[in-house]
Image (cartoon, helix red, strand yellow):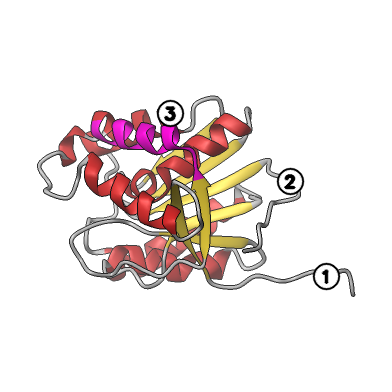
Amino acid sequence: MITLAPARLTEVALLGAHCDDIAIGMGATLLTLAHGNPGLRVRALVLSGGGTARAQEEHAALERFCAGTALELTVLDVPDGRAPAHWDRVKTALAEFRRGTEPDIVFAPQRGDAHQDHRLLAELATTEFRDHLVLGYEILKWETDTPRPAVLHPVAPEIAAEKARLLAECYPSQSHRDWFDDAAFLGLARIRGVQCHTGYAEGFELTKAVLDLGGV
């Protein structure tokens, strides 16, 4: 197995269709980034939830998941479940967001996600971030759309546990969902860990990357 490490990491961009998508999909990776890169610039865009209690949850949650970073979060009010009907607005918002960030890595939903809002954002992400490394995170939910991630990020056991704890503490509005619990989140992280010979990990889809072996 080949391990790849970025040459630099000063800024990342986070894209989510709904409040809690980012933390569910890559909360342990966020904690790892924050712990290992104090002062990292984190620019985040969430499409729906603006003006509601969900947006307040999201702001409080990402402040904790990204503690010690320079976090900027925008939460829009695109109707939940109706993002494709607001394609032009989503595209315009994403283009505006792109002009305000120059990330080393972009994190977005994975393109095979069954939820139409997630899938639209995943498809549009690479149209705005055309020359960037875009990694698609997986969002655990009731649909059987779990991907086969090409990129695996090992995380320490205590980080995996901290992610599960913070999800429960930061998103009380989701506690009624039968899949929203420590066992589910740690179970998926354990499976991804098995797939890269470690305890726990988070998985990401990779659409395209350029390999530089020094020949150009």
On the image, numbered disc 3 is attached to which residue? 63
Q: Amino acid at mark 1?
A: Leu
Residue position marked by numbered label 2 in the rendering: 8
Q: Is residue 90 left or right of residue 84?
A: right
* Placement of the N terminus among the 4 image quadrants: bottom right
Check if mark 2's residue and mark 1's residue have beta carbons within 8 Å: no
Locate residue 77, reporting x and y percent: 29, 49
Up-down: is 162 above or below 87? above
Against 181, residue 69 (above or below) is: above
Measured from the top left, where is residue 107 in percent x and y?
A: 50, 54
The residue that mark 1 highlights is: 213
Q: Secondary structure at mark 3?
A: helix
Q: How far apart are the two marked residues, 3 and 2, measured between alpha carbons?
A: 23 Å
Q: Which residues are magenta?
A: 155-168
Say what secondary structure mark 1 lies in.
Answer: loop
Give yes or no for contact between labels 3 and 2 (Cβ–Cβ under 8 Å): no
Q: Earlier in the sequence, mark 2 or mark 1?
A: 2
Mark 3 or 2, which is nearer the eye?
Answer: 2
